Amino acid sequence: MLAENDEDLYSCNTDTLLTVLNVIHHNGYSVPKKVDFEELLDIAQLSEEYGHYRVLYLWAKLWMEKLKDLALREGYEDWIFIA
């Protein structure tokens, strides 16, 4: 039987899931050093859903630093969900 949020896991982006699992399993060589805005948003949503923010913190900080210039641009209003 699936848990309530397990169906969301099956419908999430597989690259996003792989990135999160690589971080969780300390497979740093396979974690991308740079992600685009949509990937970061997907990672943030998955992190919120499953409570992985602590384990992703350092990676998220690295990814956000590289994208911070987008925060005030039009079309990037979803940045609030990442921060």
Image (spheres, rainbow, N blue to C red):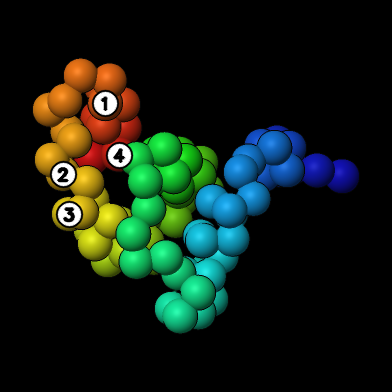
The answer to which of 64 and 1 lies nearer the viewer is 64
Name the N-terminal-most of marks 4 and 3. 3
Q: Which residue is mark 3?
A: 65
Horizontally, residue 77 falls left or right of residue 4, namely left
Residue 52, picture quadrant? bottom left
Badge 1 crowding class, 10 Å Cα cut-off, few under 14, some 14 to 19, many 20 or more, is few
User: For the residue marked with disc 3, what is the amino acid?
Assistant: Glu
The residue that appears at 50% across and 44% down in the rendered structure is: 46
Mark 4 and mark 1: Cα distance apart in space: 11 Å
Name the N-terminal-most of marks 2 and 1. 2
Q: Is residue 81 above or below residue 23?
A: above
- The answer to whether the residues at label 4 and label 3 have Cβ atoms under 8 Å apart is no
- The answer to whether the residues at label 1 and label 3 have Cβ atoms under 8 Å apart is no
Circle 1 sits in a helix, a strand or a loop, which is it? loop
Tag count: 4
Q: Which residue is mark 1?
A: 76
- The answer to whether the residues at label 2 and label 3 have Cβ atoms under 8 Å apart is yes
User: For the residue marked with disc 2, what is the amino acid?
Assistant: Lys
Badge 2 crowding class, 10 Å Cα cut-off, few under 14, some 14 to 19, many 20 or more, is few
Q: Which residue is mark 2?
A: 68
The residue that appears at 20% across and 54% down in the rendered structure is: 66
Circle 2 sits in a helix, a strand or a loop, which is it? helix
Q: Which residue is mark 4?
A: 82
